[in-house]
Amino acid sequence: MQNEGVSEQQSLPIDIYYNKLLEWLIDRRHCQSKWQDLALVIREKINEAIQDMPAVDEIMQLLSGSYINYFHCERIVELLKISESATRNIFGRYSSKRMKDWLEILQLYEADNVGLAEASHMLIRNVNYEIPSLKRQIAKSQQTQRDCTRKESEYALNANNFKDKYHHICKQMGISGTDIRQELLLLLKDLPTLYDDIRGKTARLTDILYYYAAFVDFISPRKDESERQSKELCPVICHIIEHGNTSVYQWKTGNIPTLIINPDQVNENTDNAESSEINWDITGETSKDEGAIDGINFGDNIDYGENIDFGENTETIDYGENIDFGAGNIDYGDEQTIDFGDNDISSEVKIEEDSGDDGIAQGNDALTMLDYPQTRNNYIDEILELQAFLDQRLKEMEDDTNILSSNQFQSSRDILQRQSRDSVQAMKNQVDDIDSLLTSVKIQNLFLIKASPRYVDRLTESLQHKLKLSEKMQASCKALAERRQEAATLQSELEPKLDVIVTKTKQLQKQISEEISKKYDNRIVNIMGEVNSI
């Protein structure tokens, strides 16, 4: 019975948690608590012994590997017994100093099981620190590569976007972008051609003006029953149709100047030039991240001032006698007033500057109608007025089944009776064409360039800034590619080290288990814990 109990006990495995391995050995008095002091002495002897070793491949591999422990020393002694066999005497002892040194080291390791304690300590350190550290470094390298790859694509996209915006704006402005400032200044030569184009398109608005005047006259007739003239409603447009893009002097006085003294294109008082605001009612927003300069509008967003709600309601408009158009004045210009009330229409444009009676046009009077901001704004306001009128008429004419809508102009002028929705749409297209030309990015910037040389510098700086941002993004993309390559190189260096230390740790686990098993009559020893999942 006693033998059966002993046999059963020997068949039971010994389970030791790896983190408690050294503590377990010390508690069972296999090792001393001060084993590290003895290990330091042994380490010094190992450092001296490895200075003189035979050229055996396996020995060289052991010495060049990881930290040398007790089990390495055992293997080195076995190999030296072969290489130093010629130095063995008749008593079985070795006269070789190499052999004596390593035998002494092995004996010191075996005394008080210092070698077992040191190997256990090394196992715990590898599992708790060395292997996790290498894994963290590899994971960090992989994360760095992913981040760099993602940012590379973002930077490359941003670089292309900035470059595309640069080329797009240059294309809008009609320049190549080689010498931005000089090309922008040369664009001023295009203004006369653009003015001729505007004048030509304006000349085709005669029928539209007549239609507008007839409509206003029909819904708000004068007491004396006289017909309104187009120039009473849109004086600037009518002036350009009749006389062309004349000087402001001729617009004010009605006389052709005998001498025109053009103002300098480069105005020394830049602040005054820049304060001549163009009432475009256009707002352009540029991202601060792109380093845009305030005040430069590349025409991304266009807002024509207050929203005009034409609505979707197609109800009949009452044109009866009780319509009161005098409740509120409509302001279509800086000083021009159009009143649709019972009183006679008063169209007055006030320009306070005195041109004199000598026939000489100078200062603002020497500018053309489209060059001078005030008259240009009046022209734009009149274009917008026609545009709003035609928009409203199209809304009213949408419902062709409305009997009142088709018969309400029977007593009006012929031009009102013969208009269809298609003809009004054609009129609207003509006005829209002029509006799109006036609000184009190119002509907006040409107006500002002519008004202020500093604007040229700001516009040049803004365009160059986009190009610099593109180059900066490309440089960042290149730096990220180098960083990603460095991380990949580090990963390729760490992964073999991790494989080696994992292999050595598992081998060390097996050797420690076998060594402890010898002390307990070859019972199975299991070292438990994270060591089995590294």
Image (cartoon, rainbow, N blue to C red):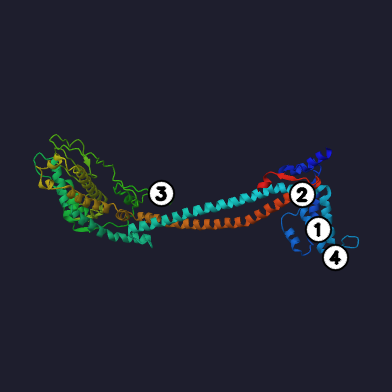
- Using the image, tell me which numbered label, if any, was put on residue 287: 3
Assess whether mark 2 and mark 1 are in contact (beta carbons under 8 angstroms): no
* Callout 3 secondary element: loop
* Callout 4 secondary element: helix
Tell me the kind of residue under disc 3.
Ser
- Mark 3 and mark 2: Cα distance apart in space: 71 Å
Using the image as rendered, state which of residue 469 and residue 37 is in the foreground.
Answer: 37
Tell me the kind of residue under disc 1.
Val
Give x and y (percent) for residue 241.
Answer: 17, 54
Which numbered disc flags the more N-terminal residue, 4 or 2? 4
- Mark 4 and mark 2: Cα distance apart in space: 32 Å
- Mark 3 and mark 4: Cα distance apart in space: 86 Å
* Callout 1 secondary element: helix
In this rendering, the label closer to the viewer, 1 or 3: 1
Q: Which residue is mark 4?
A: 86
Task: Specify the quadrant of the image occupied by residue 53.
Answer: bottom right
Give x and y (percent) for residue 426.
Answer: 19, 51
Using the image as rendered, state which of residue 154 and residue 232 is in the foreground.
Answer: 154
Which numbered disc flags the more N-terminal residue, 3 or 2? 3
Circle 2 crowding by C-alpha within 10 Å: few under 14, some 14–19, many from 20: some
Tell me the kind of residue under disc 4.
Ala
Q: Which residue is mark 2?
A: 514
Furthest residue toward front: 1
Q: Which residue is mark 1?
A: 77
Which numbered disc flags the more N-terminal residue, 1 or 3? 1
In this rendering, the label closer to the viewer, 3 or 4: 4
